[in-house]
Image (cartoon, rainbow, N blue to C red):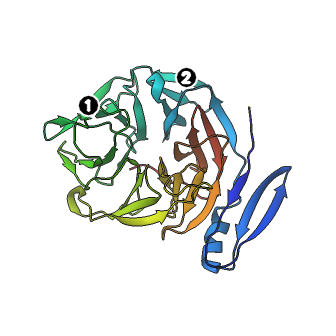
Amino acid sequence: MKRTVLLRLVVRTAAVTVLVALLAGGHGFAKETTSSNQTSASADAIFPVGDVELVKDGFQFTEGPAWDESGILYFSDIPNTAIHRVHADGTVDVFTLESKHTNGIVVAADGRILACQMDGQVVVYDKNDASATVLANAYEGKRFNAPNDLVIDKQGGIYFTDPLYRAPTPLPQGIQAVYYIANNGDVTRVTAGIDAPNGIGLSPDGKKLYVCPSKQAEMLVYDVLSDGKLSDGKMFCRLTQPQGKRDTGADGITLDVQGNVYITTHLGVEIFSPAGKSVGLVRFPHQPANVTFGGADRKTMYVTARGAVYRVKMPIAGLASN
């Protein structure tokens, strides 16, 4: 089953924008351009993109898309405590029905399946039987709130967000923050309190960590220091807001090999340059939750959106996991 939707590219500078409707092959998208050569060049490198295609629907709330180099896409269905797989031939099957509300998933370069279970732990799944081994479930003797999303650094350490969604009340940790699991298993809290930290990603060189809060329009970036430590955070970008809204936040994040940042928002997947300039927005039939790249060339963008999974062909390859 295939669906196409409006693809909308938004480029922002102080210049006046001009809307140009482009039609090709019977499918349309809209593109806003400006006289800014630098921003337009970034936009032209990313757009136009392919049609938005439905991969599979019929789920409750899809999350955690993660590409395995074997040609399998993993994703979670949180309310059903399930993780599913999309195989190369398009078939979809169940990986596990005992995911403990798994949210974010990452398939590491060595093939390990790492995941945030919102029931309080970060785990690694066995590919053969889906059994889970806990990597971390507490900090300073207290369980985590509800681990949400994660990313692996070049040293094999794991950064993950720990917000309030599905967490007990009062919050076990007292604050919402980002944590780091070192190779030796040591856990460190690496940020101060963040209101609803959600998506998390690393730049291609591993020197910047991006964190997407869900309750504010300003996305955060940190310099990565030694031993997993971070600098103080600063604003990376401000999300485009739905009409009449001011502070809607983000959910998931991924990056491409050029360092462009793809963030799932209330409007779609908004794309930012490494400098934090908005260069485009891809819309979907439903509000996206998370995003990743896959395919043999990593030029297929996979998006989980409410009860469905979608894909879009992109001109720039996504960044592979460490």
Q: Distance between the residues labelled 1 and 2?
A: 24 Å
Q: Is residue 52 left or right of residue 133?
A: right
Q: Residue at x 62, y 25 (%)?
A: 58
Which label belongs to residue 176? none
Q: Is residue 309 left or right of residue 53?
A: left
Q: In this view, does 316 lie to the left or right of 187?
A: right
Instruction: Specify whether residue 203 is in view.
Output: no
Q: Where is residue 128 in the image (x, y as percent from the top left)?
A: 40, 23
Q: Position of residue 50 (x, y in %)?
A: 71, 51
Q: Callout 1: helix, strand or loop?
A: strand
Q: Callout 2: helix, strand or loop?
A: strand
Amino acid type of the residue that numbered disc 1 sits on in the rendered structure: Val
* Residue farthest to the left, as pictured: 141
- First along the sequence among labels 1 and 2: 2
| Residue 134, placed above or below residue 287 | above
Number of numbered labels in the structure image: 2
Q: Where is residue 45 in the image (x, y as percent from the top left)?
A: 64, 66
| Residue 21, placed above or below residue 73 | below
Q: Where is residue 31 in the image (x, y as percent from the top left)?
A: 73, 63
Q: Residue at x 69, y 75 (%)?
A: 34
* Residue farthest to the right, as pictured: 26
Q: Residue at x 62, y 61 (%)?
A: 280
How packed mark 2 is, by other alpha carbons closer than 10 Å (few <14, some 14-19, many 20 or more), is: few
Amino acid type of the residue that numbered disc 2 sits on in the rendered structure: Asp
Q: Name the residue under label 1.
A: 134
| Residue 129, placed above or below residue 267 | above
How packed mark 1 is, by other alpha carbons closer than 10 Å (few <14, some 14-19, many 20 or more), is: some
Q: Nearer the viewer, residue 88 or 311?
A: 311
Q: Name the residue under label 2.
A: 93
Instruction: Specify whether residue 298 is in view.
Output: yes
| Residue 227, placed above or below residue 58 | below
